[in-house]
Image: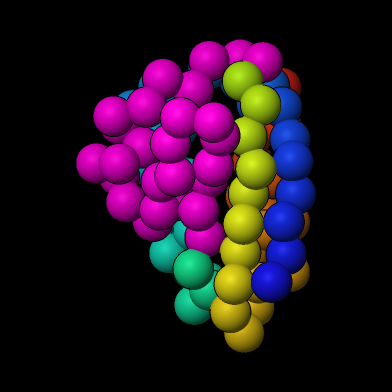
Amino acid sequence: MYIKEIRVNRFLNAQDIAALTNLASKYVSDITLESKHYKINVKSMLGLLSLVLDKGTEVSIIAKGDDDREAMLAISAFLEEES
């Protein structure tokens, strides 16, 4: 299991969320975003659409599974990328 705390560096619109769920779906690991108020499966487009992930939001990425390290690195790179 890998956990990384990050600050989101971009506002996620619907296209970004679709790209994020597609990226997460490439991995077999379970990947979640957690904050004080929510815990969302990153492979769930509906779950991510229900969030407001503004630029500057602090979240934890938690990945568990066979490719958890690679999944965590890919998702964190996506969310930390400046828009």
Judging depth in this view, the residue of 4 and 12 nearest the camera is 4
Vertically, is 36 above or below 33?
above
Judging depth in this view, the residue of 34 and 78 nearest the camera is 34
Q: Residue at x 58, y 79 (%)?
A: 65
Q: Residue furthest left?
A: 46
Q: Residue at x 30, y 41 (%)?
A: 47
Vertically, is 8 above or below 74?
above
Report the colour scheme. rainbow
Classify residue 9 by image quadrant: top right
Query: What percent of the width, then of the height, locates residue 30?
Result: 49, 68
Say left or right for 3 vs 19.
Answer: right
Query: What percent of the width, then of the height, locates residue 71?
Result: 63, 64
Vertically, is 32 above or below 13?
below
Q: Can see residue 15?
A: no
Query: What percent of the width, then of the height, locates residue 16?
Result: 45, 32
**In the image, residue 38 lies in the stretch drawn in magenta:** yes
The residue segment tinted magenta is 31-56
Vertically, is 48 above or below 54?
below
**In the image, residue 75 lies in the stretch drawn in magenta:** no
